Image (cartoon, rainbow, N blue to C red):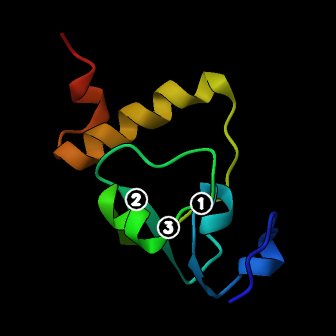
Amino acid sequence: MPVRPAVGVEDVRGLVVLGNLPLHLAQYAAEVWAIEFSGAAPRGAEYTAADMEAAGARLAWYVVLGGGLPLGIGELDAVLSARAAALSGVPAAEEARP
């Protein structure tokens, strides 16, 4: 498996990726296996599999579904309110009432 210091959309599109990716790139991968730690991750040096085990390392599987629609800061509140309402089953207009 190649290890790359930087990747773009075409490097991950449709592939299974092992490693951490920003969400704007992860949405193009078929799936992402991220390394996560239950404790503090070792920092500042290369570490062995035993070091990772001791720090509680595990692989977590993600599929990111992105819309690819950039939002302005002013649009964020409306989008988040609508998403919260959709997830709770309450229409956004009713949720906004006191």
Secondary structure type for disc 1: loop
The numbered mark, 1 or 2, whose residue comes first in the sequence reads: 2
**Amino acid type for the residue under numbered disc 3:** Val
Question: Is mark 1 in CB contact (under 8 Å) with mark 3?
Answer: no
Q: In this view, does 82 lie above or below 63?
A: above
Q: How far apart are marks 3 and 2 (CA)?
A: 16 Å
Disc 2: which residue: 36
Secondary structure type for disc 3: loop
**Amino acid type for the residue under numbered disc 1:** Gly
Where is residue 81? Give x, y as percent.
Answer: 37, 31
**Amino acid type for the residue under numbered disc 2:** Glu
Q: Which of marks 1 and 3 is in front?
A: 3
Where is residue 36? Give x, y as percent.
Answer: 40, 59
Q: Is residue 40 above or below residue 68?
A: above
Where is residue 71? Give x, y as percent.
Answer: 67, 38
Q: Which residue is drawn at 64% across and 88% down?
A: 15
The answer to whether residue 56 of the structure is visible from this angle is: no
Q: Is residue 87 left or right of residue 44?
A: left
Disc 3: which residue: 64
Disc 1: which residue: 67
Secondary structure type for disc 2: strand
Q: Nearer the viewer, mark 1 or mark 2?
A: 2
